[in-house]
C-alpha cells in the first residue's frame, strides 16, 4: 500500500520531527519562516549525502579540485554576476511555478504565466531583490553593504586562477564546492524544498569552448547515474530540457533533473552550459585577466563552463520521499524508510530481547564492537521487540540485531532485514564483519513482491 | 632552525596561498575585509579536522547527539541570549586584547584596559552591535529584522527538548554542532584568527545542577587530550582560567585553551560552565517549559550546561602554525608542514623518476590503486625529483613514492618519509597496505635530533 497523494508530505514532516530528522527552526518561538534545523538523524543523513557527493566529485577524480569559499563576498561580485541588476525592478511572481517576471513584462499582460501556463497566478508587484543584504563594519550605509551569497558558484569563478595555479591543473578540469546560500524567496514552501537558507553542492567544469556540448552531455549522464546509484527509483526521475524562454541569461543550454515529488515534478539539480559568460564578466568587472594559457596549442582563451548545481536539502527530500513506504504487516500499517544503507544515519540497532538472563551484556558488547569499528549503532532495551523494530523502520536502520535466549546458549543472534523482514542467525562475533560486507555491496531496493509478511 | 618571530605569519599566509590552502576572499576584486576562502588543500585539511572532531564528540559516544541548526533564527532568540541588549550601547574596544567595554564604564576611566592592562589602547566609542543584521521578506523594517547567528550554541538550546525526546536521551547527555557564525568585529586580523565569518564546533553538555563542577573538569581534560592527540606540541598549549572580571555574564567558571601563536598566547577553544542561564532565559522568553523530568528521582529541573566551544578556523591555524618548520637540508632551507597524517590533505604523492622506460606506467598504477582505496594521492611527473619532494613537504604530504630504474627490474619502489627524510624500498604491490598501516598508527612528531640530513 503506497500513499501517493499530498498527505505524504504531512506524514513526512511528522516523521521527520518524531524521529529527529528535521525540526522547524526556533520552534519554541513559533518558528522562523521556512527555515529548518537538522536533528540527530537528519544531520547524519545529510553528512552521508554530502560525503557521497564529495567522494564521487572530488576524491575519486584527478580532474576536480575542492573549494570552500566564504558566504560573504565583495559586493562587486554580484554586480558582475548580474544579481544586483537582475532583481532591482518591481517583480511579480507566479504562485505556481515560482518564476519571477518584471511587472511591466508584456508577456504577462494576459495574466497568464508564459512558462507554466497558469492563469491569475501572479503576486502583487514589489521592488524586490532576491539577495539578503547586510552591512560590514560599524556604519550601515551603501558603502558597507554586502550580500549573503545567493549561490556558491561565484566563489568558484573568482578563485579560478588561484585554484588552477596552486593545484597545477590543466583544462579540462573542475572545481567543486558545498555550502550555504541564501535567497529571500517571496513564496517559500513545501518543507525543505524551497527555503530561504539552503545548502548547495556545485561543480564548475572548465573546458575548451568547442568541447562544451560534449561535456554537457557527459555531466548530464554522470549526475543522473549518481542519483540512481542512491537507490532512487528510475520512474520518479526525468530530465527536463529548458526551452529557449526558460533559459537563464547566462545559459546556452540547460537540463534539470526532476523528481516526482508529492507536489509534482520539480527540479533538484541542474546541468548548465554557462559558456564564457561568468569569466568574461568577472574579467570585465575586476580588470584582471582570467584567460587560460594552453601549454600545448600556445593559445590563450576564456574557458567555457559546464555547471552541475544540486540543492543538498532538495536531494535529501528526494531521498526521504523515495524511501518512505507504508505497508500492511500482520494487519498493522508499517512505516518504513528504505534508505540506501550508505545513507542511513544508523546502520544497526542492537536489542536484548529482555533485560535479564545475560542478554543485555551480550548486546552491549556487540554495540560497542560496532561503534569501535566506526559503524553507527543504536542500543535499545525499552518496550516490546515489535515496537523497537518499528522505531528503527521509521529511522531507516537497515539491520536490527536481537540477542535472545538462544544467544546465551550458542553465541548466535538474529539479524532482521528492514526491507524483506527476513531474519537470519549469525554468530555474535561475526556481526561487525557481516555488516561491513553488506555495506560494501551495491544496494538494490526489493520489489514489493519480494517482501515477506512476517516480522 | 626554527622561525619563531612574527615573520612566521607572513610566511604562513604566503605558503597557504601558494599551495592552495587559503586564499583571500574575492581577491580579484581587492579582497573582502578579513574573509578567507579555503582552497583545494585547505578544504581537505578542514574536512579532516571537522571529521576528527565529529568522530570524537559524536560517533564514538553514546551520550552526545549531533545537530545542524540554521544560521537564520527567530530574532527573539538573540533577545533571550542577551546579544541584542548586550551590544546596543556605545562601545570602545581594547586594540590589544579585543575586549569591548561600554564607553561610560568607570573601570576604563584611567585609559588602562582592566583586563590586559594595556594603556592608551581604546578605539573611539561607537554605537555598535556585534551581530550582522538583515531582513527576511520583501519589506526592510524592524519587524522583518533577523540576525546572522553570532554563535551556534543558541541553536542547540532552543532544540534541547526536540533532541532529548526524539533521540530518547537521558541526562547527562550532550548536543554537538558545527557550522558558520558571523560577528561584525571592529578589529579583525591575524589571518584566519579573528574573522567576521568563521566556523564553530560547539558541544553543549546538559547535566544535573550539583554535578556541574565535576563535568567541567572532565571536559577540560577531554578537550586538551583531543588537541594533544593531533600532534600539537604540549609546550605550545596551556589553560587560562577566567578571572572573575573576565567571566561572561552567563558563566560561573570558564577555561580557555590557549596556543602560543606567533602573535602571542591566544584562545582557540573555551570550556564554560554556563549554569542554567541559557535554558532559563529561553524558558522565560518563549513561555515554553524547558525542564527535564528525571524518571528515577521523579524531579523536574533545568539542567546546567557545560559548553566546549572551539573555533575551527582557529584550530586550523593552530595546526598549520605548529606544523610549520624550516630546516637546513644540504645547505638549502627546507620548508615542511609536519601535519598529523590523519589531517594531511594528501597522504601520498607518486612520482616516476623520469617520464620514460616504463616508470610512468607503474606510477600511474600505484596512484590509481591508492585512489581506489580512498587514500588521497597526488601524481606528479614534472620537474626534478628534489623539487617534487619540496612541493609535497610544503603541502604536508607524509609519504612520497618514487618509481625508479630498479622498480622496472624488481617491482620495488622507494617511500620517502616527510619528517625523517629516510627512504625505504617496498614492493609496489604493497603500497596501499603499507600506507593504510601507517595511517592506523598514532602519530608522534620526531624530535629535531632524529631528523636525517639526507634527502
Image (spheres, coloured by chain):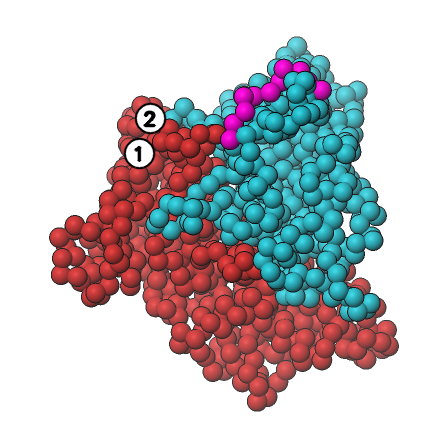
Chain colours: A red, B cyan
Residue A187 placement: quadrant: bottom left
A329 and A186: which is toward the camera: A186
Residue A444 in picture, x, y percent from top left = 51, 68
> Which circle's residue, 2 or 1, is located before the other in the chain?
1
Which quadrant of the view contains residue A116? bottom left
Q: Is residue B121 magenta?
A: yes
Q: Identify which residue is drawn at 30% across, 54% down.
A: A255
User: Does residue A346 show up?
Assistant: no
Instruction: Left or right? Give the position of A389 relative to A301.
Output: right
Please determine whether, in this image, residue B190 is positioned above or below residue B375.
Answer: above
Direction bottom: furthest residue: A331
- Chain letter of the residue beneath label 1 in the structure image: A
Q: Give the percent coordinates (x, y) of residue A69.
A: 47, 37
- Give the vertical position of A58 relative to A329 (above or below): above
**SS majority, magenta:** loop
Q: Is A114 or A293 nearer to us in this picture?
A: A114
The range drawn in magenta is B117-127
- Disc 2 secondary structure class: helix
Q: Residue B4: where, in percent of width, then height? A: 69, 16
**What residue appears at the point 41 percent right and 76 percent down from the top-left corner?**
A4
Q: Are marks 2 and 1 in contact (CB under 8 Å)?
A: yes
As rendered, which of A405 and B168 lies closer to the eye? B168
Looking at the rendered structure, the secondary structure element under dot 1 is helix
Question: Do callouts 2 and 1 point to residues on the same chain?
Answer: yes
The residue singled out by tag 1 in the image is A80
Q: Which mark is residue B418?
A: none
Image mark for residue A286: 2
Amino acid at each position: 500500500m503506497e500513499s501517493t497523494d499530498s498527505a505524504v508530505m504531512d506524514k513526512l514532516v511528522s516523521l521527520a520531527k518524531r524521529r529527529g530528522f528535521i525540526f522547524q527552526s526556533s520552534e519554541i518561538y513559533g518558528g522562523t519562516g521556512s527555515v529548518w534545523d537538522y536533528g540527530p538523524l537528519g544531520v547524519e543523513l545529510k553528512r552521508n549525502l554530502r560525503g557521497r557527493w564529495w567522494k564521487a566529485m572530488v576524491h575519486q577524480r584527478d580532474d576536480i579540485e575542492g573549494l570552500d569559499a566564504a558566504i560573504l563576498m565583495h559586493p562587486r561580485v554580484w554586480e558582475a554576476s548580474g544579481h544586483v541588476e537582475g532583481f532591482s525592478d518591481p517583480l511579480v511572481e507566479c504562485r505556481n511555478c515560482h518564476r519571477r517576471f518584471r511587472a511591466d513584462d508584456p508577456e504577462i499582460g494576459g495574466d497568464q504565466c508564459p512558462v507554466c501556463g497558469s492563469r491569475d497566478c501572479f503576486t502583487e508587484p514589489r521592488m524586490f531583490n532576491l539577495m539578503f543584504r547586510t552591512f560590514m563594519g560599524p556604519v550601515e550605509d551603501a558603502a558597507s553593504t554586502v550580500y549573503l551569497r545567493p549561490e556558491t558558484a561565484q566563489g568558484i569563478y573568482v578563485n579560478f586562477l588561484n585554484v588552477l595555479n596552486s593545484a597545477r591543473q590543466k583544462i579540462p578540469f573542475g572545481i567543486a564546492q558545498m555550502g550555504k546560500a541564501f535567497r529571500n524567496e517571496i513564496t517559500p514552501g513545501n518543507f525543505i524544498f524551497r527555503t530561504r537558507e539552503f545548502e548547495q553542492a556545485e561543480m564548475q567544469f572548465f573546458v575548451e569552448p568547442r568541447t562544451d556540448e560534449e561535456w554537457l552531455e557527459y555531466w548530464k549522464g554522470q549526475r543522473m547515474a549518481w542519483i540512481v546509484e542512491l537507490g532512487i527509483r528510475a520512474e520518479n526521475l526525468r530530465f527536463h530540457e529548458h526551452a529557449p524562454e526558460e533559459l537563464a541569461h547566462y545559459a546556452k543550454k540547460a537540463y534539470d533533473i526532476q523528481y516526482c515529488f508529492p507536489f509534482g515534478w520539480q527540479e533538484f539539480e541542474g546541468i548548465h552550459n554557462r559558456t564564457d559568460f561568468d569569466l568574461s564578466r568577472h574579467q570585465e568587472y575586476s580588470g584582471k585577466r582570467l584567460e587560460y594559457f594552453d601549454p600545448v596549442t600556445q593559445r590563450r582563451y576564456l574557458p567555457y563552463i559546464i555547471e552541475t548545481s544540486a540543492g543538498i536539502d532538495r536531494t535529501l527530500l528526494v531521498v526521504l520521499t523515495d524511501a518512505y513506504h507504508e505497508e500492511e504487516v500482520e494487519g498493522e500499517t508499517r512505516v518504513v524508510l528504505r534508505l540506501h544503507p550508505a545513507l542511513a544515519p544508523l546502520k544497526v540497532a542492537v536489542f536484548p530481547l529482555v533485560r535479564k538472563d545475560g542478554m543485555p551484556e551480550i548486546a552491549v558488547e556487540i554495540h560497542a564492537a560496532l561503534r569501535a569499528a566506526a559503524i553507527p549503532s543504536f542500543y535499545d532495551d525499552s518496550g516490546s521487540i515489535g515496537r523497537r523494530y518499528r522505531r528503527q523502520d521509521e529511522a531507516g536502520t537497515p539491520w536490527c540485531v536481537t540477542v535472545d535466549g538462544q544467544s546465551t546458549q550458542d553465541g548466535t543472534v538474529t539479524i532482521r532485514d528492514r526491507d524483506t523482514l527476513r531474519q537470519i542467525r549469525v554468530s555474535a562475533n561475526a556481526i561487525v564483519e557481516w555488516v561491513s560486507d553488506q555495506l560494501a555491496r551495491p544496494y538494490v531496493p526489493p520489489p514489493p513482491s519480494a517482501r515477506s509478511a512476517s516480522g
